[in-house]
Image: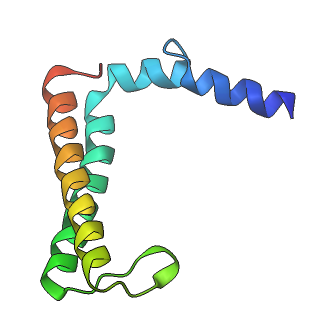
Amino acid sequence: MNELMNRAIMIGDRDSSANRWLREHPLVLGGFTGVIGLLLLFYGISGLKSGSPRGKFGVQLTGGAATVTSMIRLIMGIGLLIFAAYVAFFGAP
């Protein structure tokens, strides 16, 4: 268990080898966040259009919960796309 915790802490370390590699290759980080942002944007827009998106565990949402869930997905998707563009142009923070 301690080995697992040490690895988790090392991933969060700013100077770990994985984080250094991502800082040297910002397009990889920007690409991953861009793909996730596009997926969230797609699911947010499609949920708003249909009016009944699927929630956690595939439950069909209706009413206010459907609108709120779709708006959260839409806003998070836009935020991730902005972050992906920032990382691609200016490098990893």
Q: Between 74 and 1, which is closer to the camera in this rendering?
A: 74
Q: Is residue 69 above or below residue 78?
A: below
What x and y, as percent, mark residue 4? 78, 34
Front position in the image: 25 or 60: 60
In the figure, 93 relative to 30: above or below?
above
Residue at position x 28%, y 28% from top? 26
- At x 86%, y 35%, the residue is 1
Q: Residue at x 18, y 31 (%)?
A: 88
| Residue at 26 percent of width and 76 percent of height | 64
Task: Determine the residue located farthest toward the front in the rendered image.
Answer: 64
Residue 79 left/right relative to 9:
left
Q: Position of residue 75 (x, y in %)?
A: 19, 53
Q: Is residue 58 above or below residue 79?
A: below
Q: Which quarter shows the C terminus?
A: top left
| Residue 45: image location, x then y, percent | 15, 72
Q: Position of residue 80 (x, y in %)?
A: 24, 45
Asked which quadrant contains residue 20, the reply is top left
State how many labels appear.
Answer: 0
Q: Which one is in front, 55 or 22?
A: 55
